[in-house]
Image: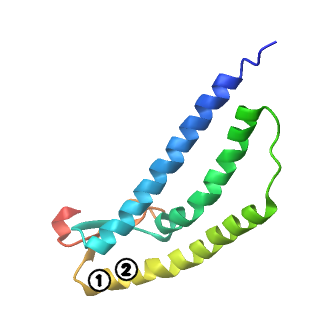
Amino acid sequence: MDDVTRPFYSVFMGFLLFLVCWVCWLSLNGYIDFFRLSDVIVFSWRVGVIVFATPLLLYFLSVPLYFQLRGMPIKVNNKLFGRLAMLAMVGAVVSLFFSFYVGYSLKANGYKTCPRKSWNAPTEYVRDIKLC
């Protein structure tokens, strides 16, 4: 008997892969805007950590993908997982300190901060307060 859930899992995996790539792209745009000194820059430590956590998320996505393609469970590579987890943790610390540097650097260059819509929202830096 055929497994009817196999196409559902494949579509779900494709959606998750698209979502991870899209979120990583949004995070990279924050870095690119900072280095280009754009008129509007949206940045926070969470935006920064996504770049470092993306390899770990892609590893987690590869496990079910391998299971879908091969039909058998994958052997978990603990060394690779440990290194990717360490990269994500180091990235969280680096992005926390980098977000402080971004705020200090942009304020020194004359950027203003927009009022936040919520306490959890990333900080938006603008050259002119009218851009808020």
The count of marks equals 2
**Coordinates of residue 91 in the picture (x, y in percent):** 57, 73
Image height check: is 31 above or below 23? below
- Using residue 55 as the reference point, say whether residue 27 is left or right of it: left
Residue under pointer 2? 103
- Quadrant of residue 101 in the image? bottom left
**Coordinates of residue 97 in the picture (x, y in percent):** 50, 82
**Residue 123 appears in the figure:** no
Q: Estimate how packed mark 1 is, as few (under 14), some (14 to 19) or many (20 or more) residues with alpha carbons within 10 Å.
A: some
Q: Cβ–Cβ below 8 Å for labels 2 and 1?
A: yes
Q: In which quarter of the image is the C terminus?
A: bottom left
Label drawn at residue 107: 1
- Using residue 6 as the reference point, say whether residue 38 is left or right of it: left
Q: Which amino acid does label 1 sit on?
A: Lys
Residue at 76%, 34% (x, y): give it.
Answer: 70
Residue at 70%, 24% (x, y): give it.
Answer: 6
